[in-house]
Amino acid sequence: VSGVPAGGKHILADLYGVAAGTLRDCRRLEELLRGAAFSAGARVLGSHFHSFGAEEGVTGVVLLAESHISIHTWPESGFAAADIFMCGAAHPEQALTFLIAALAPTHQRVEKAGRGLGATEPEPLTQDLSGQ
Amino acid sequence: VSGVPAGGKHILADLYGVAAGTLRDCRRLEELLRGAAFSAGARVLGSHFHSFGAEEGVTGVVLLAESHISIHTWPESGFAAADIFMCGAAHPEQALTFLIAALAPTHQRVEKAGRGLGATEPEPLTQDLSGQ
């Protein structure tokens, strides 16, 4: 299973107390996420962002050769949910540091999960419901 | 903070033992993820998929009004890393059930994290390094 990403890391970051103007600014968020990818040493395949309206939030993703970075924002609450998933030699923590420096939240909740090899043992699935 | 997503759920699914042909098939994976979104009652904003080559893996995302579903595949290892993040009234577990039924992994590792309100208390960030 040499191709299973060893040391794939997935970071979930809930960021509170971010300026509403930033969380509504689709182009700025796209630049931020591309910057975060660059700071992590990841290769950007493309980025796709959607604004829900001038006064509304943004949802977007940067697809990477190493996986992805996404963000979803709720400007009315100063809240952003980001996730950073990178395999290979990229440095997802650098991307997180970049995002936090740029978004300047007052509070955060960060969870990290291992993906692929090196994480906990996967469980077998019994899909035969006939009684095996 | 009424706009912070209450009950936002993020599911990380590592799927092992999936048929290589499926994991190389960009169009089929895009259809699967759109189907998973539909089965969850989510609204698709757009989908973006990238094949790394005819014999290689695929990386892709479906952006949703409720957040996103992504997949990254390693066909040479029969491995796929999916994540399903949904806020609001959508049903991310339905999307997971749909994906597992379609991809038929032999083993899986699934982690679930709460996002936004209803998850654990966020921590304050001290960004002033000068000493208060």
Image (tube, coloured by chain):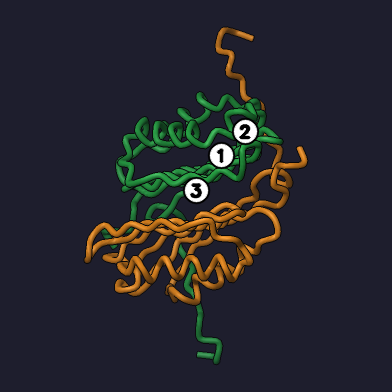
Chain colours: A orange, B green
Q: Nearer the viewer, mark 3 or mark 1?
A: 1
Residue B108 vertical placement versus B128 (above, below)? above
Q: Nearer the viewer, residue A84 or B132?
A: A84
Q: Are marks 1 and 2 in contact (CB under 8 Å)?
A: yes
Instruction: Find disc 2 in the rendering and name its residue.
Output: B108
Mark closer to the chain start, 3 or 2: 2
Same chain? Circles 3 and 2:
yes
Q: Give coordinates of residue B124: x percent, y percent.
A: 47, 72
- Residue shown at the point (66%, 28%) measured from the top left: B17
Disc sitting over residue B13 in the figure: 1
Mark closer to the chain start, 1 or 2: 1
User: The residue tagged with tag 2: helix, strand or loop?
Assistant: strand
Disc sitting over residue B113 in the figure: 3
Can residue A78 be seen from the camera position used here?
A: no
> What amino acid is found at the position of numbered circle 1 in the picture?
Ala
Q: Quadrant of the N terminus of chain A?
A: top right
Chain letter, disc 1 residue: B
User: Could you say which quadrant of the image residue B22 lies in?
Assistant: top right
> What amino acid is found at the position of numbered circle 2 in the picture?
Gln
Mark 2 residue crowding within 10 angstroms, few (<14) / some (14–19) / many (20+): many
B66 on left or right of B69: left
Residue B62 vertical placement versus A108 (above, below)? above
